[in-house]
Amino acid sequence: EIKFQAEGGLIATAGDEKREYGQGEVFAVTPDDAMFQKGTIKVESVVSGDKITVSSLNRGYGTPSYLGSFELFSSAEGMILVNELPLEEYLYAVVPSEMPASYELEALKAQAVCARSYAYNQTQGLSYPEYNAHVDDSTSFQVYGNSKEQESAVRAVDETRGQKLWYQNQVVTAYYYSTSCGKTTGIEAWGTTPDEQNQYLQSVEICKEDGNAYEAELPWYRWRAVVQEGVLSNLIELNTATEIGTLQNVSVTKQGAGGVALQIVAQGDGGSVTVDTENKIRRALGGKGYKIEKQDGTVVDSQTLLPSAFFQIEKSEGNYIINGGGYGHGIGMSQNGANEMAKCGKTYIEILQLFYQGVTVE
């Protein structure tokens, strides 16, 4: 069941059928609703600009409300909910979901330009053609509507309205991640061959004029994990679907720009496995069963992925010690790096032109 309501009322239509709901009145729909026999159900607010609350959903900030209109499709798995709205208004709910709205305005503006560039490229095709939809609201694309709209994020979108990142006469796909280790890496970390179109994604140092990294004081700038031999043996076998027996050694056999691990080899008494590219390496060494200590002393449980692929690993007394830095894939813009740069007076243009080499903002 999906439940909708809007302050000024709703209109639901399907084919020649039309239902009207008054101020705050709930429109509840189930997969067997007779309206679906007439096609897709469209839900619009009576008052232009009114948000539609979907009270049957729950997001990071609670019950979400959305600008624009909705289309509902009935499928074998249930109902598909598609929100249609202008790109700029979409960004109002992306920016605070992807970067804390408390961050510096110039960092939020950089995030807005990145998110707009990414979204623009997604509008050039349909990722969900069966629903006439470009993106979903998850990390598979960009997180949308998980955090409440905030005045600072709306301002960042409005003050950069329409601005996108361009390179070689193309709008670029502006990748971003949480925290750097003081350096970014290039597209090779994903196994992609550098070419004329992706040269904006290069390894750069994120350092102040005095040579100190902008993020040097942040918790994830450096981190450390001590993993028991047996735990890492099991995780590597599980994550790579390769039987290697008891782990004897793990080594980084290839590094990329900025010091990122591009290849590791795990050797056991029953075989070995080679893992390439940053995401697969982080997955191979990730999983439950050990703790990670950030440089500020806080300790967190290990996750599906290792925090980053910027690390060194060594064996010591039945344990594997992983010393690493940063959080995320390390390609494109560090969001925390952008915020620290903004605190030091850098503009969003300066921030973007550091992380994405040779781009223009137009």
Image (cartoon, grey):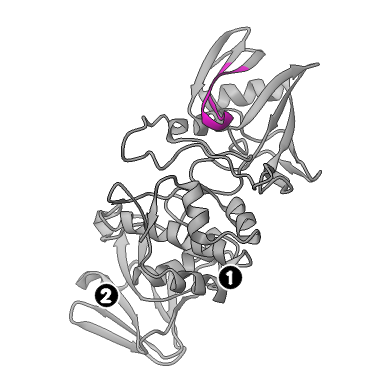
Image location of residue 118, percent across then percent down: 38, 54
Q: Which mark is residue 340?
A: none
Residue that badge 1 annotates = 62
Name the residue nearer the viewer: 2 or 343.
343
Quarter of the C terminus within the rendering = bottom left
- The question of residue 221 being in magenta is answered with no
Q: Residue at x 66, y 13 (%)?
A: 249
User: Mark 2 or 1 closer to N-term?
Assistant: 2
The quadrant where residue 322 appears: top right
* Extreme residue in the front direction: 209
Q: Relative to 118, does residue 41 appear above or below in the rendering?
A: below
254 with respect to 359 (left or right) = right
Q: Can I make out residue 101 in this image?
A: yes
Crowding near the residue tagged with mark 1, few <14, some 14–19, many ≥20 C-alpha atoms within 10 Å:
few
Q: Residue at x 62, y 17 (%)?
A: 251
Name the residue nearer the viewer: 342 or 209.
209
Q: Residue at x 29, y 46 (%)?
A: 168
* Extreme residue in the left direction: 16
232 with respect to 64 (left or right) = right
Q: Relative to 124, does residue 3 appear above or below in the rendering?
A: below
Specify the amino acid type for callout 1.
Gly
- The question of residue 252 being in magenta is answered with yes
Mark 2–mark 1 CB contact (< 8 Å): no
Q: Relative to 107, does residue 273 appear above or below in the rendering?
A: above
Residue that badge 2 annotates = 35
* Residue interval drawn in magenta: 251-265
Specify the amino acid type for callout 2.
Met
Q: Can I make out residue 146 in this image?
A: no
Name the residue nearer the viewer: 215 or 274.
215
Quarter of the N terminus within the rendering = bottom left
Image location of residue 99, percent across then percent down: 56, 60
Crowding near the residue tagged with mark 2, few <14, some 14–19, many ≥20 C-alpha atoms within 10 Å:
many
